[in-house]
Image: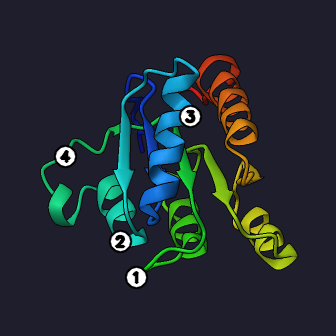
């Protein structure tokens, strides 16, 4: 089964909070990360996008984002369930997923790693710290990381 190609280094941001969404996009732009940003506002929308169902039924699912930035506290389907479903499916098993959350619960971190996240980042409250975290995240996942061959 083919894993698809990286979609011109697009980023899938899964975030339900409009303020956090705007902050993440602003931080990406401030760091000159001009990659396409696809936003899903809940777990269902994220899964629909990645698996080409629902409102994304006509999307080419072979075009994968370079990285998924996944919040945990999401409506309809939470981030941990999204992560579980991604890791269960051969088409998305190797897709890089960075949990980007305000949760400081140790159980959330343990559960995220046990379900296969590649990285767990707590959102800093301070914009300068958040911007720096996004800069480093972009540098690593979009420039330095070598994705698995397709």
Residue 72, quarter of the rendered image = bottom right
Q: Earlier in the sequence, mark 4 or mark 2?
A: 2
Which numbered mark, 4 or 3, is in the foreground of this view? 3
Task: Name the residue at 66% across, 56% down.
Answer: 99
According to the picture, the residue beneath numbered tag 3 turns out to be 27
Q: Position of residue 51 (x, y in %)?
A: 32, 57
- Mark 3 crowd level (few <14, some 14–19, many ≥20, 10 Å Cα): many
In the picture shown, does residue 64 fall above or below 103?
Answer: above
Find residue 137 and report its horizontal and vertical position in percent: 68, 33
SS category of the residue bearing label 3: helix
- The residue sitting at 54% across, 24% down in the picture is 30
Discs 3, 2 touching: Cβ within 8 Å: no
Q: Residue 135 location in percent, x, y? A: 67, 27
Which residue is identified by label 1?
76
How packed is label 1: few (under 14 Cα within 10 Å), some, or many (20 or more)? few
Residues tagged 4 and 2 counted as in contact (Cβ below 8 A): no
């Amino acid at each position: 089964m083919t894993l698809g190609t990286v979609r011109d280094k697009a980023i899938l941001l899964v975030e339900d909070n409009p303020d956090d969404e705007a902050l993440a996009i602003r931080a990406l732009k401030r760091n000159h990360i001009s990659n396409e940003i696809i936003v899903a506002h809940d777990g269902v929308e994220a899964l629909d996008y990645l698996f080409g169902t629902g409102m994304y039924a006509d999307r080419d699912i072979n075009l994968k984002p370079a990285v998924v930035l996944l919040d945990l506290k999401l409506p309809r389907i939470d981030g941990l369930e999204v992560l579980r479903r991604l890791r269960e499916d051969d088409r998305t098993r190797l897709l890089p997923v960075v949990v980007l959350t305000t949760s400081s619960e140790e159980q959330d971190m343990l559960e995220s790693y046990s379900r296969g996240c590649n990285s767990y980042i707590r959102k800093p409250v301070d914009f300068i710290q958040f911007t720096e975290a996004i800069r480093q995240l972009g540098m690593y996942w979009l420039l330095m990381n070598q994705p698995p061959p397709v």
